Amino acid sequence: MPIGQFYISMIHKTIHVNWDFIGFSASFLCMLHCIFLPIVIAIFPLMGLAFLTDEFYEIFLIGASLMIAMFAIYNGYKKYHGKLLPVFLCLTALVLFCIGFLIENHFLERTLHFLGTFFLIIAHYYNWKFTKDHKSCKIKQTHSM
């Protein structure tokens, strides 16, 4: 069973979970939240979505994105590609998020969180690409023997 991919065996079915795709999706949702929250903040209470403006939701999104990223990128690094670029990008995102939480300026906080999310998305992309390239190389090696 490859690390970075999670298999759930059911009676006669196997569900394959791609952690980079889940992490990319969570990071992308976080980025959409950062972009559209200032625009639609007045409309959310009218739609019953006031919870989306709560800081807890923001912390939850960022925390979930970071945990998924760390799991996927660590597994990709350790098991497949051994390249530090995705790790560096993930750590850069973590630093940007932490600085963003410490800063009182709302615009600067949003900007740092947006950049952190962008770095997470790029980290997932490179982790996925490096993992895919490594698997492709392994398949070519076994077919040529």
Image: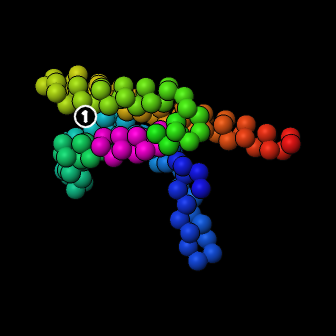
Q: Is residue 112 visible?
A: yes
17 left or right of 58 in image? right
67 left or right of 6 in image? left
| Residue drawn at point x = 52 percent, y = 47 percent | 4
**What colour-coding does the image apply?**
rainbow
Query: Hey, what amino acid is under mark 1?
Result: Pro
Relative height, residue 83 to residue 144 (above, below): above
80 left or right of 43 in image? right
Place residue 47 in its image quadrant. bottom left
Residue 14 on image: x %, y %: 60, 66
Residue 112 on image: x %, y %: 29, 25
Name the residue at the bottom extreme.
Answer: 11
Q: Which residue is mark 1?
A: 38
33 left or right of 144 in image? left
Per the image, is 90 magenta? no
The quarter of the image holding the C terminus is: top right
| Residue drawn at point x = 59 percent, y = 56 percent | 1
In this rendered view, identify the residue nearer to me: 80 or 99: 80
| Residue drawn at point x = 66 percent, y = 37 percent | 134
Relative height, residue 8 to residue 104 (above, below): below
In this rendered view, identify the residue nearer to me: 37 or 21: 21
Q: Main secondary structure of the magenta part?
A: helix
Place residue 55 in its image quadrant. top left
Place residue 62 in its image quadrant. top left
Give SS at disc 1: helix
Magenta-tinted stretch: 62-73
Relative height, residue 47 to residue 24 (above, below): below
